[in-house]
Image (tube, grey):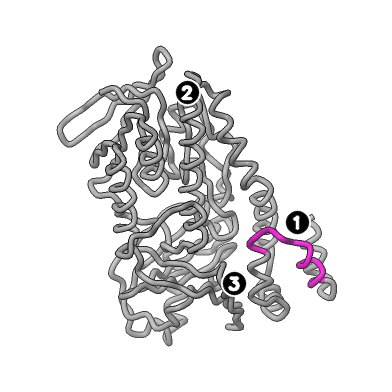
Amino acid sequence: MKVDCLVVGAGPAGSVAAKEMARRGFKTLLVEKKQEIGIFKRCAEGVTKHGLEKLGIKVNEKSIANRIRGAILYSPSGKYVVMEGNDMEGYILERKIFEKYLASEAIKNGAMCMVKAQVMEMKREHGLWKAGIRTIDGEIEVIAKIVIGADGVESKVGRWAGLNSINKLTDYHSCFQYEMANVKVDEKYIHLFFGNDVAPCGYAWIFPKEFSANVGLGILEKKAKMKAIDYLKKFIGEHKDIFEKAHPVEMNAGGVPVAHFTDMVSDGVMLVGDAAQLVNPIHGGGIVRAIHSSIIASEVAEKAFNRNDLSKEMLKEYEKRWDEEYGEKTEKLMKLRYFLEKLEDKDFETLADILQGEDIFQLTQAKMSFFLKKLVKKPSLLLLAKKYLM
């Protein structure tokens, strides 16, 4: 089979990339190695409303498991800070439905789609990519002018293209999550719990849905004394008021990147979403960034096709545009992440005392100057902040 564009992976990034390429008139094939699009989620399914609206993404009502007003952040002792406002409004998605919806939009716009179709190898020949794909009906060969890798954190497309798609171990968090029924929390907020005994260099979360809640945590294993699942069991056991009669209906585990690398393109190849590890370094969220990366990549790909130039040099415009949009902010958030990873539990208590919800939101937007002013009367924290944030 010959196509203009082969998209590998039908998560949010892949399906949006397939839609964008197909609606521009390019013969596009979307392949997903799993038998069902949307299964085996690796995230808590939260997304901001304004983030999707900014990208022109309409959410199918059946994809929304809950509407949230904001977030509540808890210190180790139980002090809390409430974050709410228009920018904090969002959805807890039902990923199984949301991802099928995005794939169906790609198909409606002309993309072909195959499930239970795993790319086993890719080779560059005569300016084209030849992909060997194992399907339920046997092996097929697909010849593509361009390949968009949306195949997740362990991207094989990136490796086949000669890209360095592996980050430092300290830039991955080990995560474990249950979906649980009968969790007792305020369902209009997501709940985030901090502390080195809760989740070393990470946090625990509760994301309420209509009939259940995603309950999980992420840790930096290098700093941990236990596995992520053990920290999660401990967290649940210590919050009997929330989980006394709750039970799991699903479990998921995996590694989540908290930093991205700069090499996102090669000749005839572009990496999007988690394949390029395009996440927010503070909370590891990546749905909006994944979708945005696919939109930018498809715009650059169209330009490259029109110029009959799919070289790495031409496709680097995608990297350039991404850096213009997110580069400076991501660099600042990386520094903030390193600062937060150095905090002791007593420091989290101090921050809970001096920061308001709006302050924390400003930090997540990489606005740091006011934060340093707040720390003037906290010498130990100020020295640490100056070391990592300036």
- 197 and 206: which is toward the camera: 206
Q: Tell me the amino acid under the disc marked 2.
A: Asn
Residue range corresponding to the magenta coloring: 363-375
What is the secondary structure assignment of the residue under circle 1?
helix
Q: Residues within 10 Å of mark 1 (few under 14, many from 20)?
A: some
Residue wearing tag 1: 388
Asked if residue 185 is positioned above or below residue 163 in the image, the reply reads below
Where the N terminus falls, by quadrant?
A: top left
Quadrant in the picture for residue 350: bottom right
Which mark is in front, 3 or 2? 2
Please state the horizontal and vertical placement of residue 288, each as a whole percent of the image: 49, 53
- Asked if 359 appears above or below 162 in the picture, the reply is below
Measure the alpha-carbon separation of dots 1 and 2. 44 Å
Q: Residues within 10 Å of mark 2 (few under 14, many from 20)?
A: few
Residue depth check, mark 3 versus mark 1: number of the one nearer the observer: 1
Predominant SS of the magenta segment: helix
The mark nearer the N terminus, 1 or 2, is 2
Image position, residue 383 (x, y; %): 82, 64
Q: Nearer the viewer, residue 55 or 369?
A: 55
Q: Mark number for residue 195?
A: 3
Camera-side mark, 1 or 2: 2
The residue shown at (66%, 52%) is: 329
- Give the CA distance from mark 3 to mark 1: 19 Å
In the image, taking residue 268 as reference, residue 342 lies left or right, namely right
Q: Amino acid at mark 1?
A: Tyr
**Front one among 194 and 360:** 360
Residue type at mark 3 is Gly
Residue 140 screen position, x and y as percent: 22, 26
